[in-house]
Image (cartoon, helix red, strand yellow):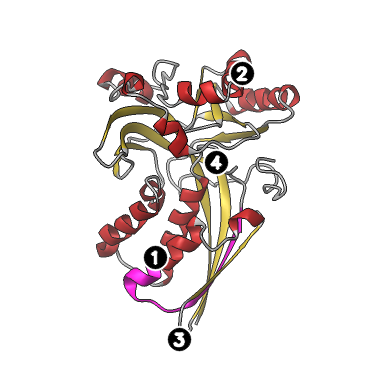
Amino acid sequence: MVKLLAEPAPAKINLFLRVVGRRADGYHELDSVFLPITLADEITLEIRDAPSTSITLDCNVAAICTGNDLATRAARALLEEFGLNADRRIELTKHIPIGAGLGGGSSDAGAVLRMISTAFEIGADAAPRLHRIALKLGADVPFFLDPRPSRVTGIGEVLKPLPSMAALSLVIAIPPFELATARIFRALGPSGWSGPASDADLASIFRGEISSITTINDLAPVAISQFPEIARIKALLEELGAGAAQMSGSGGSVFGIFKSPADANKAGMEARVRMPNTTVVTASTVDSLGASLLTFDDAPIDSKKPHQ
């Protein structure tokens, strides 16, 4: 038996990211809204019957092909959980910049879990087992099992799908450096925790009234203190017409929300000129993998350059 599957692995933005507290094990409790976007990696999975398990990863970014990447670890964990043997070849084309707060590695892992589950007809009754596997791989991976606009709480494992929202036109700017998530969280003290979003803030978001008030990211001041370029990027996107601009996740990518795709495209072209060392992509939010054709913005990542 040979099965060949292909899926996009979408990036996400954190429309807001608020810290609620910290658990005894050191993990922070969050309140966030995750929105999948049209920027996506490409994953092809080839599965062949075999007496034992082997997993091979081909990727356009050499640093990822280590055997310890999230896509390979996801495949290995699922096979072990369900006692499956097969020869697997994963072909991964990265378009989502690495270490940028856009969830690229987590999305790759979620896509691999979805695809293997489809190939072996693992049914909905196994959803709790898949969720446990995903959470062991990383706090964001459960979201990418079924990426759709969601309110995310806990450490990332508590997901509540949101009502349908109008697509947001985005410009996303990624500086040429990576931020270490653990380091950013360690530097955040309790005085920087803003607590859960209010009902009024959520109501504003659902009405499409998104502003600096509703796009708080508690990690942004910490990241900016270490990398002031993030603040300069945010200010430029606002100058170019973004109704709101904010860092996504633990950084350092910054998204700006524009009134229309045309406005976003115009701002994106200007941002590329004014920030030549920063990767700039235009994108939009989507309701689900099936709700809109996911696109691969610009060329694949050059393996010799972290964010180009």
Give the residue type that dot 2 points to: Arg
What separation in Å lies between label 2 and label 4 (alpha carbons)? Answer: 19 Å
Which numbered dot is residue 232? Answer: 2
Secondary structure under badge 1? helix
Taking the spot 54% from the left edge, 25% from the top edge, the residue there is 226
* Badge 1 or badge 2: first in the primary sequence: 1
Q: Is residue 161 visible?
A: no
* Residue 227 in the image, given as x and y percentages of width and height: 57, 25
Residue indicated by mark 3: 51
Residue 239 appears left or right of 163 = right
> Which element is circle 4 on?
loop
Q: Of the residues shown, which amino acid type is indicated by label 4? A: Gly
Compared to residue 67, the image places residue 8 above or below, namely above
* CA gap, disc 1 and disc 2: 41 Å
Find out whether the residues at labels 4 and 3 contact each other: C-beta distance under 8 Å. Answer: no
Which of the pair 151/204 is nearer the observer? 151
Q: Find residue 92 and report its image quarter.
A: bottom right
Give the CA distance from mark 3 to mark 2.
55 Å
Q: Position of residue 7 (x, y in %)?
A: 52, 57
In the rendered image, which residue does mark 4 sit on? 99
| 69 to the left or right of 173 | left
Q: Which mark is residue 77?
A: 1
- Does 89 appear in magenta? yes
- For the magenta stretch, what is the residue range? 77-93
